[in-house]
Amino acid sequence: MLDFLSRERIVARPGYSRWLIPPAALAVHLSIGQVYATSVYKSALVQHFDTSLTRVGFVFSLAIVMLGLSAALFGTWVDRNGPRAAMVVAAVFWSSGFLVAALGISSDQLWLVYLGYGVLGGIGLGIGYISPVSTLIKWFPDRPGLATGMAIMGFGGGAMVASPLSGRLMALYDSGYDSSDPGSVASGGAVAALFVTLGLVYLGFMLFGALIVRVPADDWAPEGYDPSEKKQNKMVTDASVSANTAIRTPQFWLLWTVLFCNVTAGIGILEQASPMIQDFFREGGSSTVSAAAAGGFVGVLSICNMAGRFVWSSTSDKIGRKPTYMVYLGVGVALYLALALGGSTSIVLFVALAGIIISFYGGGFATVPAYLRDLFGTYQVGAIHGRLLTAWSAAGVAGPLIINAFLDAQGEPGKLVSGDYRPALLTMVGVLVVGFLANLAIRPVDEKYHEPESEKKEADA
Amino acid sequence: MSEQQKDHTENNKENHTVGIAVSWGLVGIPLAYGLVETVRRAANLFVG
């Protein structure tokens, strides 16, 4: 049975279409992307456990921290055992996380929700997130940015699917709940039933991905692909760097800083999107932007986040990874400045600026695996990516901390004016400048870090 | 390439075309649902 999961059993036969691999990756990423759709039932859990929003919110923060930790810890295991084993393990953890959390809700035990969704689910998130990355890069050596962009776009899309679906399912399980009424709160039983449903649906969906995923044969290359073209670019290596060695290179930590800064700055807007647009257009105590329109703004940002993952990551195949991050961070500085200083002059301008910033935020996630491939080779790119994702966990803590600290000093979001956001936004400009400089300092990895060809072959065997 | 090999390759391609359509459909339909729902929500920004 376990042999069925092994890397050797899923080597593609000649003629296997590589276009079957992105749906496998999307099946996993669409499932685990649910983690960003938790706001739908947060109030229901607060009411059910009769506790604070902070204690319920901790479940989801814990899941993101576990994502980073498990991706870092199990990355080498994922690379060694292949995508099918990794997807199955991720599916089991992610699904059992929902089931244990459902048990916690039904038995009024909040700690079981922490253990289920936060710890078990978080481990599933981390393994699932990195499971298809190195496989996609190997199938698409000519367009790694496009390939990883497609998969990581699914992570953004997962929340867009889970959010309305969860609302409808809770309305089905609790007749007193109206998903279209923001004041309506579902019962704990409805959330437990939702968790059981999602756990089973995601298990099936992720196993489907595991079933169709294949790794290319060692001598496989796409038709018409000429690896010598890749060699002309000094920033793209054909050597191999192991995961353990990669974390000793300055390039790894510079890229860690780049990802950390890009994510921190993006979270600055995402964290407060809805109250922020209302505050920016407040005149004499009341906002010209209604609560419904502010909800629409969050929807626009979700679309920009998802689109940015695909569009910018694909573009990076043409213009190169380093210039792409120059755009994310350098143009990001200009856009953040424009938002801080002139964002309140027009709603259209505000939405356009925030939308592009968030598309850069999404693009940063999707482009980073291809950047790692360029610098460290394909050898253990999944494991290196896993370790780099600790930057995401750190930014998930730092971003909200920065923005909330500044806004708390001004008053309560939802009752502020545009000027109150200026210190927080200008701080984010500083964060982006640090990221820009870190990216500027990235050079090809020194040859002393490259794996000797013989050792790499032995490890592969 | 022998006739038998050619037939095998042709069959393989056909199977893959169906497989690709089904696989993309399975992930594309939920993604399209999510996108439509989000666009409907986003429309509130312009009418609200």
Image (cartoon, helix red, strand yellow):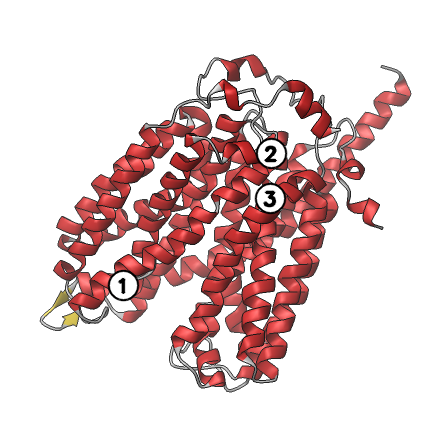
Q: Tell me the CA gap for discs 1 and 3.
A: 33 Å
Q: Quadrant of residue A39?
A: bottom left
Residues tagged 3 and 2 counted as in contact (Cβ below 8 A): yes
The answer to whether one can see residue A329 in this image is yes
The foreground one among A23 and A395 is A395
**Mark closer to the observer (2, 1):** 2
Q: Kindly identify which residue carries mark 3.
A: A75
Q: Which mark is residue A380?
A: 2
Please report, as a chain letter, where disc 2 is located. A
**Mark closer to the observer (1, 3):** 3
Residues tagged 1 and 3 counted as in contact (Cβ below 8 A): no
Where residue A229 sits: x, y (%)?
Answer: 52, 14
Labels 2 and 1: the sequence-earlier one: 2
Where residue A436 sits: x, y (%)?
Answer: 29, 35
Q: Amino acid at mark 2?
A: Gln
Labels 1 and 3: the sequence-earlier one: 3
